[in-house]
Amino acid sequence: MKTSCLIILIRDGEPPLIKGWIPFIGKALEFGRDAQKFLEEHKKKFGDIFTVQIAGKYMTFIMDPRLYPNVIKHGRQLDFHEFANKVAPITFGYPPVINRKFPGLKEQISRSFQFLQGDNLTSLTDSMMGNLMLVFRQDHLDEKPSRGGWKTSNMYDFCNSVMFEATFLTIYGKPASTSRHSGMAMLREDFVRFDNMFPLLIAQIPIWLLGQTRTIRKKLINYFLPHRMSCWSNGSKFIRWRSELLQQYDTMRDVDRAEINLSLVPMDYRNLKQVFIKEQASSLPPHRPYAGAIDLLYGSTLPSSKLYNPSKPEKEVVETYIVDSLATGPPLAHHFAILWASVGNTVPASFWAMYYLVSHPEALEVVRQEIFDVLKLSGAEFSSNKDVKLSREQLEKLLYLESAINESLRLSSASMNIRVAQEDFSLRLDSERSVAVRRGDIIALYPQSMHMDPEIYEEPETFRFDRYIQDGREKTDFYKEGQKLRYYHMPFGSGSSMCPGRYFAINEIKQFLCLLLLYFDLQLEEGQPRVNVDYSRAGLGILLPASDVRFRYRLRRV
Ligand code: HEM
């Protein structure tokens, strides 16, 4: 009989297992094409809990959002950092932070996140306001108006150029003698080229298979060379604190060495063997594929006496070597990772919020009026000739704007919350259900399926700017089968892996939209088709638009 998948029920209490026909790859290809559709189809067949083999990993999906709290609270048995510690270093090019050579580094890095929140958010928000205004004024407000006063642009490019630079200035600071960094357009271009490869890097495709990506990444990392950064001023406390911390751990400043060895980490035995075969290295010892591949790729970086130690399995020796040599990388790559974290999602999120507002003029007018009202309440007179400043407190009062942003995040975010089981145990999900989990298994939540559930969100495909407002306040009650949900909006992840930059992100998107709405009349150009999402980074954060959209804008007469 022909079926599209293999189902094997194993061990008592384990969920149904769905395997593909292709060994190792499993269901990765189908999942990658459209994760949301894939999961919904499997939910219909197998219920709320099922395991899928994806790229050699067993991932158990918990689809019912009423069960989320029980996964999120299992911090000890279901760990996020094990996964992050594997994937982030190979993507961004820094040594794993959980490493016996760096005791305490992970905890210190987590401590640095306090500088994005609490009282620190006020100065960060003020600084972002100034930088946004600077970029906005120099690039868009002081420009000569064209005939009829309207100018046109691609919306994504517009968002990217403003948000990328203003965020960069806020997080890292400005150069010594001018207010803006030279080469920002080039940096942004390189960033986009790297970002296009991001899903492949996260999927642990070796960087050397991805064309120029390694060179581009190196260029991006080198933007943060110490002699450069030491001249920048007005940067965030967050980066200052992290620079000092990382310097302490920086035992060897050899960028190249870290770069070279990093690329070996994702390669499991199979990958290295493939390299070996691909390069037809028949002269190298075939019974030593690890060593052979390493020799071939990087020259004899591995001390052969260590490698050919007959008392230890080769795999173990090589892995130890790789981890040890990685423990000596520089902090620059961490700064680059933060650049990605701070703009990789914020730019597309700003785009979607702008796109939905501009394509819903009635919503845009309500939000614009709210901004004017909040300014008026604080006695500030707005004039398009003057710079505007919106404080953290004022931004907090913009409920309709916040609801519109949350609604656009609901529609565009597709992050996956991943936890790795630290031991074999039975995960209790509610009073009736528990699942047997094996050490090393991945438990995954996929909040996009909740965001698009018609029972929780009526007409989930529709943008309703006031969906998160009820009786003039923030609406927090959303239900599934009569049960109030604790987690109903999760663009920023959950529990131990929740985004530490979330408050800053919402504030900066608000500030950006405030400037747009206060200073400009905005319209989509006639005949623009509806913008669809590109699913290629499903699971990784905010989805990109499949195409850009033309819009026009002109200075408002206020
Ligand atoms: C982590 C989303 C903006 C800094 C995360 C995660 C998500 C996320 C889903 C968790 C990843 C996971 O579970 O694997 C977003 C979205 C943003 C945004 C949707 C914008 C709309 C920012 C900004 C910053 C930032 C502006 C910093 C200025 C970070 C950092 C982490 C992170 C440092 C890693 C935390 C850790 O290792 O524990 N973000 N983020 N994010 N985000 Fe954001």
Image (tube, rainbow, N blue to C red):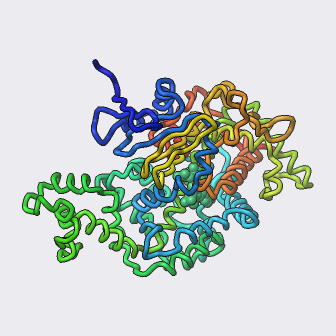
Q: Quadrant of residue 70?
A: top right
Residue 403 position within the rendered picture, expressed as x and y whole percent measured from the top left? 74, 40
Q: Quadrant of ligand 1?
A: bottom right
Looking at the figure, which quarter contains the N terminus?
top left
Residue 189 position within the rendered picture, expressed as x and y whole percent measured from the top left? 46, 55
**Residue 279 horizontal side relative to residue 555, left or right:** left
**Residue 181 horizontal side relative to residue 69, left or right:** left
140 and 472: which is toward the camera: 472
**Residue 4 horizontal side relative to residue 496, left or right:** left
Q: Quadrant of residue 124?
A: bottom right
Regarding residue 495, the answer to whether it shows in the image is yes
Residue 101 position within the rendered picture, expressed as x and y whole percent measured from the top left? 43, 76
The residue drawn where x is 87% and y is 45% is 373
Against 30, is 297 above or below?
Answer: below
The residue drawn where x is 62% and y is 52% is 495
Looking at the figure, which quarter contains the C terminus?
top right
